[in-house]
Amino acid sequence: MHGATPFVWLEKLCKAHGLPKVNLHSFRHLNASLLISQGVDVKTVQSVLGHSQASTTLDIYAAAFREREAQALGAVAAVLNEPISKKA
């Protein structure tokens, strides 16, 4: 396969379906973002992306991990704010 074949294929696909032109690397970021949004831990995301250090993954996707952290803290706060039900 010629090195440009995937890029040409993707460009034709986007054009045929009226989609904005994206590059293949965008799918890498999409993959990472979806994994993080589903609560996958940083070590697993690091492994999937092939980063040698978890710090690389954290540096690149810090905002996504902060968002997950905020959601987790919100979940804890929601549980703590629930009224204690009375026993009958």
Image: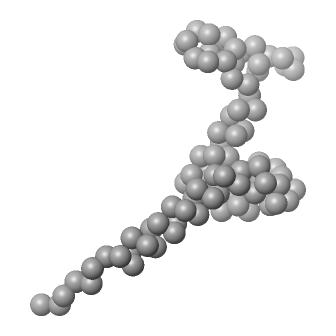
Is 82 positioned to the left or the right of 52 in the image? Answer: left
Above/below status of 58 relative to 6: below
Q: Residue at x 31, y 76 (%)?
A: 82
Q: Position of residue 2 (x, y in %)?
A: 87, 17
Identify whether 45 is placed above or below 25. Answer: below
Q: Is residue 23 above or below residue 64?
A: above
Q: How many marks?
A: 0
The percent position of residue 19, horizontal first and vertical second, equals 58, 17
Q: Give the colour scheme of this rendering.
A: one colour
> Which quadrant does the C terminus fall into?
bottom left
Q: Nearer the viewer, residue 80 or 41?
A: 80
Q: Which residue occupies 67% across, 46% down? A: 32
Q: Residue at x 80, y 60 (%)?
A: 54
Residue 75 shows up from this direction: yes
Residue shown at 63% from the left, 46% from the top: 33
Q: Quadrant of the N terminus?
A: top right
Residue 25 locus on image (x, y percent): 76, 32
Residue 28 or residue 60, whichever sits in front: 60
Residue 79 falls in image quadrant: bottom left
Task: Reply above or below: 72 against 87.
Answer: above
Q: Residue furthest bottom?
A: 88
Q: Say if residue 47 shows up in the picture.
A: no
